[in-house]
Image (cartoon, grey):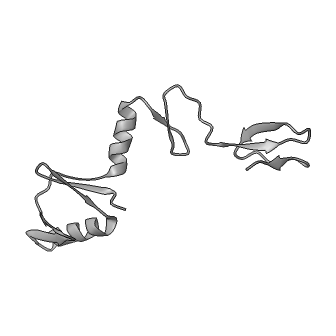
Amino acid sequence: MKNWILTIGIDKFYLTEKEKVFYLESIDKGAKYISIGDKILGTTFQTLINKSVIEETKALNEGKKQCEYGKWHDKNASCFCGTRWIMSIDGVAREVPHNYELSEGEKELK
């Protein structure tokens, strides 16, 4: 997956982790130009950034918050990432915390 964005001038190039490592190692070895796939890239770049940083910045600018499970939610939305559903002994489905221990007769719903 091409998770890295390399900016050279006004052009953006998308790189895999392996391509990013190869690119940076080639620069360290003194290369002026680096061939990656069907591209020949220069070594003077403005940014080399992971797409997740851009996604995080966008979410923050939209006023979203990240829960402890790594998911982004609207600012005032409730987070249910750490919950699961069980069927209680009396046949009632209910939501419980992720670390809830089932009692005898309770079953986890899938």
Report the side of 99 relative to 102 (left or right): left
Q: Residue furthest bottom?
A: 29
Write down the quadrant of residue 55 in the picture.
top left
* Residue 54, position as x, y percentages in the image: 32, 44
Report the side of 59 relative to 13 (left or right): right
Q: Residue furthest left?
A: 32
Report the side of 99 relative to 104 (left or right): left
* Residue 20, position as x, y percentages in the image: 27, 65
Report the side of 10 relative to 75 (left or right): left
Q: How many marks?
A: 0
Vertical comparison of 62 with 20: above or below: above
Vertical comparison of 45 with 70: above or below: below
In front here: 83 or 11? 11
Q: Residue furthest top?
A: 76
Quadrant in which the N terminus appears: bottom left
* Residue 17, position as x, y percentages in the image: 33, 65
Q: Residue at the spot x=14%, y=56% of the render?
A: 45
Write down the quadrant of residue 18 in the picture.
bottom left
Q: Residue at the spot x=10%, y=69% of the render?
A: 33
Vertical comparison of 3 with 98: above or below: below
* Residue 40, position as x, y percentages in the image: 13, 67
Q: Residue at the spot x=83%, y=43% of the render?
A: 87
- Residue 102 seen in the figure: no
In front here: 16 or 44? 16
Q: Residue at the spot x=21%, y=66% of the render?
A: 24
